[in-house]
Amino acid sequence: QVQLVESGGGFVQAGDSLTLSCTTSGRTFSRNSMGWFRQSPGTERQFVSAVSWGGSETNYADSVKGRFTISRDNALNTIYLQMNNLKPEDTAVYYCAAEGAAFGGAWNDSLQYTFWGRGTQVTVSS
């Protein structure tokens, strides 16, 4: 059974940092693009960041550029999202996603991703 499990969320103050992790099991995603999306109550799920299968290409939403960094460690079957200078508007449930097809780019379209985690809550207080 394929699983993506996010961790690292929490309650922080504005300006703080958090690092989210997403560990996969059930199959390898070393040849697949992976990404982070987020959703807050009453809004649609939105793209945050993505990394290509080889890690050479990354993509960020304008709202997080310069503050968030995505990375992957294929040996550990894990991707990370380092989030710095967090803002109250970053409050959301953060979801990890993996593309089903191999050798893809750093897609910002949720429709490109086949496998999803259950999410981890990030709350940023002002």
Image (cartoon, rainbow, N blue to C red):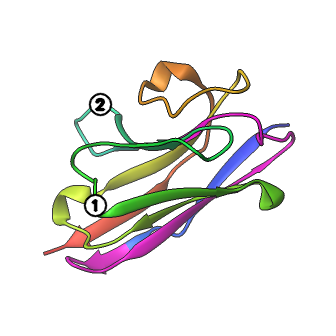
Three-letter residue code for mark 2:
Glu
Residue 110 x/y as whole percent? 46, 26
Three-letter residue code for mark 1:
Gly
Residue 106 x/y as whole percent? 51, 34
Residue farthest along the left direction in this orientation: 126
Dot 2 or dot 1, earlier in sequence:
2
Residue identified by numbered label 1: 66
Residue pictured at 57% horizontal, 57% vertical: 71
Residue 29 x/y as whole percent? 76, 39
Quarter-wise, where is residue 14 in the image? bottom left
Left or right of 31? Residue 45 is left
* 48 in magenta: no
Q: Which mark is drawn over residue 44?
A: 2
Q: Secondary structure at mark 2?
A: loop
Q: Which mark is drawn over residue 95?
A: none
Residue pictured at 63% horizontal, 26% vertical: 104
Q: In the image, which residues are magenta?
A: 11-36
Is residue 71 shown to the viewer in this render?
yes
